[in-house]
Each structure stands twice: as C-alpha cells, then as structure tokens.
Image: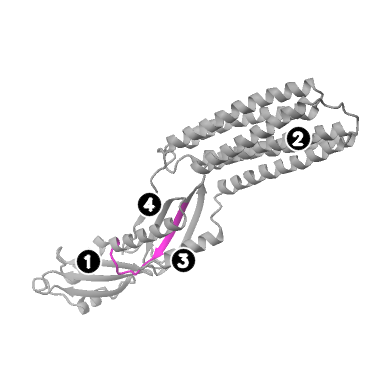
Amino acid sequence: MAQPENDHQQPDRDHKAERKAASKVTVIGMILDAVLGLIKVVGGALFNSQALLVDGIHSFTDVASDWVVLAVMHLSRKEPDADHPYGHQRIETLGTLLLGSILIAVGAALAWENILRLWAGGALAVPGWPVLVAAGVSVASKEWIYRYTRRVGLRIRSDLIIANAWHSRTDAFSSVVVLVSTIGAMLGYVWLDVVAAVVIAAIIIHIGWKFTWDSVKELVDTGLSEEDTETLRAIALDTDGVRNVHELRSRRMGHDILLDVHLVVRPEISVSEGHQIGMKVVTGMRGALDNIRDINFHIDAENDEQSPHVTQPHLPSREEIRSILATQLGSFPAHNRLRLHYLKNRIHIEIFLDDPEQSPLTTTQVRTALSDYPWFGSVRVWQATG
C-alpha cells in the first residue's frame, strides 16, 4: 500500500502576547537592576564596603543580561517563515546558553576574588550601617522580581525567562553575602564575609552550569527521557490498527517537543485508513505530553527498521506493470483496476475486473505470464458480480 507521511502541528501559541509579557517583566527587572546597581556602587564607595561595591557591579551585569533577554525574546517569538519552518525557538536556547555562561563567569569571578581576599588576610575597614540597609533592600527587591519573572516564564513556557529569574535570585544571594559579611565585620568576624561569598558564588556557578548544559543538550538534539519515550511508544502500540512501532525519535525546540515515528499497519488497508490510525496515535500522544508541538508519522506496511531496504527503487511502477501485463496477455483494458503491494522486494498484485465478460482473466493466466519476473510475488483476480 502507499505510505503517506503526515506532518501534524499543534496550533501556534500567541507569540505576540508572549513577547509582550516577556518584554514587560524584563524591562521592569532591568530598571530595578540599574537602580540597585547605582545605589550599591555609590553606597559601597561611601561606606567602606568592598562587598557592596562588587555586588553593585553584579547588578550591572544583570542589566546587560536583561538586554540580551529582550533581544533574544524578540527574535525567538517570531512566527515561522520559509527559512525557519519550525519557528525560531532555538534562538531562545542560544540565549539561555549565553545567560548560563554569564552566571558561570560572574560566579567564578566572585569566588576567585573572595578566595584571594581569604589568602591575603589583610585588615578591612568596618562598613557603615547604611550598607545593611542597601543590602536588605536589594534582597527584598531581587526576591520579588525573581518570583514575578519566574511566574511569567512558567506561564509562557520560556526557559530563557526562567533562567533570567534565577539570575535575579543570584543577585539576592550576593546581597545576603553583603549582609552576613557586614554583620560579621561589625562583630569582628571578618572571615565570615569571605567564606559566605565563596559558597554563594558556587551556587551561582551551579545554576549557570545547569542552564548551560541543558541548552547544549537541546542544541545537539538530545531526545526525551527513556521514561517519556516508552510512554509514547506504549500509547502507539495500544492504538487499534498499529502492529508495531519503530524509529520513535524526539528532540526539543525551546520548551516544545518535536516527534518522528514509524507505525507498522496491515499492508492491505487503504491509505486513508492508515492515515486515520496515525491521527489516533497523534491524539493519544498529545494527551500524554501537552507540550508536543509537531508529530510527523510515517505509515509502514512492514518493519523497515530491521530491513531498511526491503523495497528497492528498481521495482516496476504501476504503469510499467500495466505495460508488462498487456504484452504478456495480449491486452489489458484500462478499466481493469490494480492494487499493488510492495513487500520485501516483491510485488503482490490484485486485479479487479469490473466487466469479466468483456475481459475474461484468471489468476492462473496472470501467474503464468509473470512467473519469470524476479519481482513477482503473488496475484489475485477479483471479478465483479451482478
């Protein structure tokens, strides 16, 4: 039977609304980062707090990352076009990779600076009480923007926005370090500043590594987990009409999932029945994972995974077989219909005689006429009855 290949996409989400929501939360965060950065840099310089000064620099790196997020979200939420038929979500993945790299770099810089301070062991000036106020305001503000940004990221299913939310929380962690180090300095335990800073820097590096590694796995088309893959395979196998499933392949594009699957069905069914079976599989898979964007299914009459070249291109076509039958039988009227089954390098033929009296033909005649052809498998002749 014919082997239709079908591409079934989930209706596109409202990319315009998603861009608007992402831009709004990012701009709010960027303004907050700029204000906090200015307060902390000025406060650190005026009130003898190197930690607050560095934390202010960290806030300004958040402003830079917010610009990256704005640019990437604008590009990644564009509608599919001729050059990018699957959409532009991979740009978001690239942005998440860049953002994760920034987190790693900032965390490593903070860790290295504080390790050097620990080794130096020099005396530090005791910071003034306004440092505590600035750090407290920073912690509260950054925790609020973290929760707000993360909520938006989850709603629009954007890993980049979620990553930026965690970037905001790292700034809150840094401000906690400032609080601890300032209190420690006031009490005479200056070493608390350094130890806490190194611990928080390690947390920042860990978060950055997670986002970076997840992005790398997506960019190299890492598939779904074994558990999710087996769930989808079981759904297909449980669908009425599916005899086997193979070449179930998956990959991610942003938060979305793209699937390819080959479904083995009975070889004698019609193309439309095979398509209907495939649509039932699509419905079942979408019910299991709601973020499947695209399912491309291929209907097979036999398992071509174990024998990938079971049907060779040199086998004769429908018109060639008609010509051979006409030559071998003397004639083969156009109103005689053919149904061809290409299975395991053989062609199995069904002939339907709409008017047997005008063109009498028997199975034995056809079998004898085609017996010398290596591609011939079997033949059945069906006669219409009044």
Q: Which residues are magenta?
A: 258-271
Q: SS for tag 1?
A: strand
Q: CA distance from mark 2 to mark 4?
A: 48 Å
Query: How many numbered tags mark residues here?
Result: 4
Q: Amino acid at mark 4?
A: Asp
Relative to the observer, which residue lies in front, 235 or 258?
235
Q: Amino acid at mark 3?
A: Ala
Q: Which residue is tagged 3?
A: 234
Is 377 on the left-hand or right-hand side of 384? right
Q: Residues within 10 Å of mark 2 (few under 14, many from 20)?
A: some
As drawn, the label of residue 109 is: 2
Element assignment for label 3? helix
Q: Nearer the viewer, mark 4 or mark 3?
A: 3
Residue at position x 84%, y 38% in the image: 192
Q: Identify the residue at image location x=44%, y=40%.
A: 84
Quadrant hosting residue 191: top right
User: What whole-number distance in Å separates the C-alpha atoms at marks 4 and 1?
Assistant: 28 Å
Mark with earlier residue (3, 1)? 3
Can residue 341 be found in the magenta stretch? no
Q: Position of residue 375 (x, y in %)?
A: 33, 70
Quarter placement of the C terminus:
bottom left
| Disc 4 element | strand
Mark 1 or 2: the one toward you: 2
Q: Earlier in the sequence, mark 2 or mark 4?
A: 4
How far separated are the C-alphas under marks 4 and 3?
21 Å
**In terms of depth relative to the viewer, which is nearer, 17 or 302?**
17
Where does residue 137 sit, x and y in percent of width and height?
Answer: 68, 30
Above or below, comparing residue 281 to residue 142 in the picture:
below
Which residue appears at 59% of the width and 45% of the height?
215
Q: Which residue is mark 4?
A: 7
